[in-house]
Every structure is written in C-alpha cells, then in structure tokens.
Amino acid sequence: MDRTSANTGTRPVSDRLAFDENSLTQWMQKHVEGFEGPLEVEQFKGGQSNPTYKLTAKSGQYVLRRKPPGRLLPGAHAVEREYRVMTQLGLNGFPAPRTHGLEEDAEIIGTPFFVMDMVPGRIIWEAHFPDTDDRAAHFDAMNATIAQLHSFDPAAIGLCDYGKGEDFIARQVARWSGQYVNDVEAGRVEAMDKLVDWLKDNAPDRSGEPVRVIHGDFRCDNMIFDAEKPEVLAVLDWELSTLGDPGADFAYHLLMYRMPSAGSFTGLLGRDLAELGIPSEADYVAAYCERTGRDGVADLDYLIVYNMFRLAAIVHGIKGRVARGNASSAHAVETAKALEPLAELAWANAQAARL
C-alpha cells in the first residue's frame, strides 16, 4: 500500500459518515469566533478511528473530529479527551492546533465532536522521510518535540487528573490484553496469545518513573511539519493520550527503527540509515535522554515488545470494526491484514529481548 497517496488529501464524505451540514453551520456560527460561511465539508482520507473532516469557509479552514456512529467499545473514540489535552498543551507553548469548541450533544451531527484550526504544512507518511533534504534535522525536531511533551508537569498545565498515571504499564497490559481477548468478532491470533502471557510474566518494576502526559501514538505521520523547514508545527491524533510512563511513550516512537520499511506500517528496518542521513536508534535515544535529563531508558526491550503488542491490539480493534461495519477509514481492510505479521514481529522481539 502506498501510504502517502492512500492518506494524503480529502475525498467526498461517505454516506455512512455524512451529517447535517446546516446544523453544523449553525453550531459554528455560535461557537467559532469570526466564522463566516458558507461551509464546504470534505472527509480526510486518513484516520482509522475518529472520522476527521476538512471544513472550508469564507473565514478560513477548520478541522472537525467526531466519534464514529454505531456500536463502540467502552472508553474508545474519546474526542472529549483529545479536545482537552490539545487545548491545555497549546496554551502552554506545545505545538498543538488551536481548538474552538467541543460539542458533546450527539443531536447536532449525530455524535460528539470538536472543531480546531487547520494547520497548513506537510504530513510525512513514511519513516525514511522521502523527498526531504535534511532528514537529520527533521528527526531532531521530532526528538525535541516528544522531549518537550515529557517535560511538562501535568499539574502545572491543568492536567493532573487526565489519567491515573501510576502502575501505567501493568494497567495498559491488562487493558490491551482485555480488549484483544474481548473483541470476539476480530478473532484470535496465536502470537498475540503468547504475548499476553509473556508481558504479564516479564513485567518490570517501573515505579520510579515520573508521571507525564503521554501521546500514545507519537510518530511522524501524526505531526504537521513546516513545508519549508524542519519544524514541527502541530502534533495530531491524541485519542490514546493519558497520564503515564514517558519511557513507554518514547519506546513506542522508537518502533520506527524496529518496523519493516514496507507495508501498512512504515519503518526503517533494513534501510541504510547512514546513507539516508538518519541518526541511529542509539543516537536518537541518547538525544532524548540528554534533553530529558535521563541516564538511559530502562527496560527498553520490554517496552518495545509492549508497544508492538499494543499496536497489534489496535490493529485487532480495526479488524473488529471492519467486521462490525463501523471502520472510519477506506483502507481499514488493508490495515487489518497487518495484524498477524505485526504480532509475529512482536513475538520475535520478545524472544530476543534482554531482560
């Protein structure tokens, strides 16, 4: 699958995800300062979970994120949380889109939603940053951005109650194991069953880690870069954000080094990093540790396996949404095919882990 063409740009709103545009226009007039219609609505191609729309009006361009219609798993598709964390981080100097309003009344367009500014720039869908002149500087910008996120004291930015925080890894392993086991429509995978047991049996003591706001899906295609220079203008897709273990969040970001360079999930495995001008995994870890005042990332191999399992569990959920008929992305079926190869990769990393 060509991830760039599959995810870049917009398409007409699908019949299943259409809504009353007049109702939205009236809401925008009440809640978005300076809004002036008429309103044109398109659907972004990308996005596996929460449907996302481009809104074009005389007053400018906006983005709408909503919960998908249909039967949803408990706690999933939390647009309310996305709205809150982006709002608070943006107020404290972090690159997040400016938010305009959250609507929890499902009567307006059928499900809860929020509206934010559309940030002009470039989304890079491939981990090797094709057609990019200075890859090292772009990687350094990503590194600096996640380090900035993990530097915030949640209490100081109004997010002390954004999640439980403590015992994060144990709770997350239990959560994603449960979601995997309970999503019966998606079926079972042998490697996933093995990983459920391995993660429980090899859990490290992470009690000394600070509690920080974590993104949960921090990767290059969830950022908007400046079109001309290596600068992160906005971090997107905060559905999986919470308070938790920053080392685990960073390890998820590091998956780009462990994932294959082709398929539904792009990575750097097998590529010549020196030739591309991309820092090695060790150098990238060292830069993050220097920025965050760490001596290293403890339990890194376990955290890598945990994050691969979690990603596989998310894909398992996409497969379940396909089976239930409420997947929001046009290429969800193709993404779901990556489940077994991803689970096998996670199991291979578990067997090679140095614990």
Image: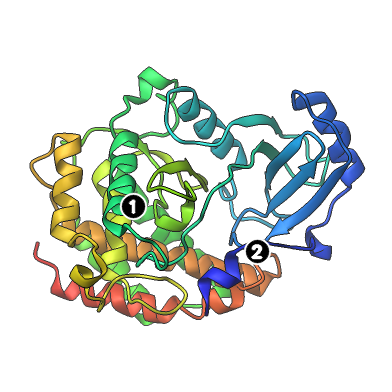
Residue 292 in the image: x percent, y percent?
A: 19, 36
Q: Which residue is mark 2?
A: 45
Q: Is residue 171 left or right of residue 73?
A: left
Image quadrant where residue 120 sits = top right
Q: Nearer the viewer, residue 239 or 290?
A: 290
Image quadrant where residue 44 sits = bottom right
Give the residue type that dot 2 points to: Lys
Q: Is residue 11 above or below residue 345?
A: above
Residue name at image x 54 percent, y 28 percent: 87
Residue name at image x 26 percent, y 76 percent: 271
Q: In what element is the residue under mark 1? A: helix
**Neighbours of disc 2 within 10 Å: few (<14), some (14-19), many (20+):** many
Image quadrant where residue 83 sits = top right
**Neighbours of disc 1 within 10 Å: few (<14), some (14-19), many (20+):** many
Residue 227 in the image: x percent, y percent?
A: 49, 50
Q: Is residue 34 above or below residue 12?
A: above
Q: Nearer the viewer, mark 2 or mark 1?
A: 1
**Distance in Å between CA atoms under marks 2 and 1:** 24 Å
